[in-house]
Image (cartoon, rainbow, N blue to C red):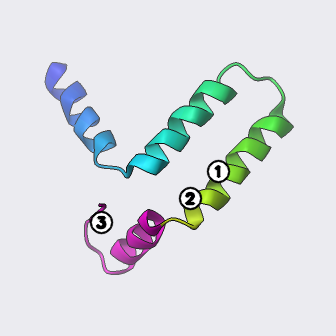
């Protein structure tokens, strides 16, 4: 089980830092919130921010080119 946990940790850590920070923020804020509209608004706002980042552009290009993304 430890090997699986470490592999999952490596997989998560390979993602770009700004998006990981946003994901943690959403998990913290939305985890106990029962206001579905507020949850959707937070997620939508951060998604729009993600679309503006160079990491998003690299992820899209890597997907189109069928290669692993190279994040800074």
Q: CA distance from mark 2 to mark 1?
A: 6 Å
Spot occupied by residue 1 in the image (x, y as percentages of width and height): 19, 19
Q: Quadrant of the C terminus?
A: bottom left
Residue 5 placement, left or right of 27: left
Residue 29 placement, left or right of 20: right
**What residue is pinned by disc 1?**
46
Q: Residue at x 33, y 41 (%)?
A: 12
Up/down of 28 relative to 37, above or below:
above
Spot occupied by residue 41 in the image (x, y as percentages of width and height): 79, 45
Q: Secondary structure at mark 1?
A: helix
Q: CA distance from mark 3 to mark 2?
A: 15 Å
Q: Secondary structure at mark 2?
A: helix
Spot occupied by residue 47 in the image (x, y as percentages of width and height): 63, 55
Q: Which residue sits furthest bottom?
A: 65
Is there a contact, CB below 8 Å, between mark 2 and mark 1?
yes
Q: Earlier in the sequence, mark 3 or mark 1?
A: 1
- Of circles 3 and 2, the one toward us is 2
Query: Range of the magenta residues?
Result: 54-72
Up/down of 13 relative to 57, above or below:
above
In the rendered image, residue 69 lying in the magenta stretch gets the answer yes
**What residue is pinned by disc 2?**
50
Q: Residue at x 84, y 29 (%)?
A: 35
Q: CA distance from mark 3 to mark 1?
A: 21 Å
Choose between 72 and 13: the one closer to the eye. 72
Is there a contact, CB below 8 Å, between mark 3 and mark 1?
no
Spot occupied by residue 57 in the image (x, y as percentages of width and height): 45, 72
Choose between 15 and 34: the one closer to the eye. 15
**What residue is pinned by disc 3?**
69
In the rendered image, residue 61 lying in the magenta stretch gets the answer yes
């Amino acid at each position: 089980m430890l090997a699986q946990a470490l592999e999952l940790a490596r997989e998560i850590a390979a993602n770009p830092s700004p998006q990981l920070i946003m994901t943690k923020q959403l998990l913290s804020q939305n985890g106990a919130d029962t206001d579905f509209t507020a949850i959707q608004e937070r997620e939508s706002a951060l998604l729009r921010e993600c679309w503006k980042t160079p990491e998003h552009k690299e992820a899209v290009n890597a997907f189109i080119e069928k290669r692993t993304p190279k994040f800074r």
